[in-house]
Image: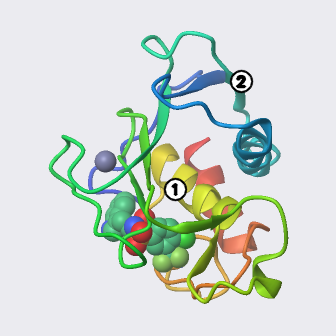
Amino acid sequence: HYSFFPGQPRWPEGTQTLTYAFDPSENLDDATKQVFANAFNQWSKVTTITFTEATSYSSSDIKIGFYSGDHGDGEAFDGVLGTLAHAFSPTDGRLHLDKAEDWVVNGDVTESSLSNAVDLESVVVHEIGHLLGLGHSSIEEAIMYPTISSRTKKVELESDDIEGIQMLY
Ligand code: TQI
Ligand code: ZN
Ligand code: ZN
């Protein structure tokens, strides 16, 4: 079953659009940006919120970046596997990914020859759930379940994820 963060923080009542932007210190290719667009769309389809890419990083609601090791927020990344990514509860908006992972952007992670391959979209969909206010779910099929195996693809929201997010938005 879905859960929320303590105190059930959420983006403000009446929020219709949230903007997101990528850390300008890195130049992500269009394929990578498309993965984020697809992941945001999953949540958009089942809520009243739409997500649009902003041109200004500093004024965007959601700030996305790939970092390695200690990157200044007290939650250092740990190299290959272990922690893959993290996101903060509403309305912080930070979504960080571990640069050290073998992210699969274009292609089928279930067919990757890399044993540590991690599907970017699966992880991003999960982290957006956190950004919006969902905690972890006890239902194994849910996107918000707290484990995923490498070389697994999980991008379709489960009814549990949808019920949880619709409690908030
Ligand atoms: N990162 C953890 C996660 O996102 C970080 C974390 C632990 C966390 N507890 C939290 C974030 C509570 C917000 C609130 O769950 S992770 C998965 C999963 C991770 C794990 O790198 O371990 C996914 C990132 F669920 F599959 F194991 C993405 Cl999809
Ligand atoms: Zn971080
Ligand atoms: Zn999580």
Residue 154, given in percent of the width and then of the height, sits at 72, 75
Q: Is residue 10 left or right of residue 34?
A: left
Q: In the displayed image of the protein, which residue is found farthest to the left?
A: 74
Q: Which residue is mark 2?
A: 52
Amino acid type at circle 2 is: Thr
Using the image as rendered, state which of residue 6 and residue 122 is in the foreground.
122
Compared to residue 169, the image places residue 105 above or below, namely below
Q: Is residue 71 left or right of residue 66?
A: left
| Viewer can see residue 16 | no
Res 127 label = 1
Residue 29, given in percent of the width and then of the height, sits at 72, 37
- Callout 1 secondary element: helix
Residue at mark 1: C-beta within 8 A of ligand 1: yes
Give me the residue at 35% from left, 34% from top. 92
Q: Residues within 10 Å of mark 1 (few under 14, many from 20)?
A: many
Using the image as rendered, state which of residue 84 and residue 142 is in the foreground.
84
Give me the residue at 49% from left, 83% from top. 147
Q: CA distance from mark 1 to mark 2?
A: 17 Å
Compared to residue 39, the image places residue 146 above or below, namely below
Residue at mark 2: C-beta within 8 A of ligand 2: no
Residue 40, given in percent of the width and then of the height, sits at 71, 43
The quadrant in which the C terminus is found is top right
Amino acid type at circle 1 is: Glu
Residue 47, given in percent of the width and then of the height, sits at 73, 42
Q: Residues within 10 Å of mark 2 (few under 14, many from 20)?
A: some
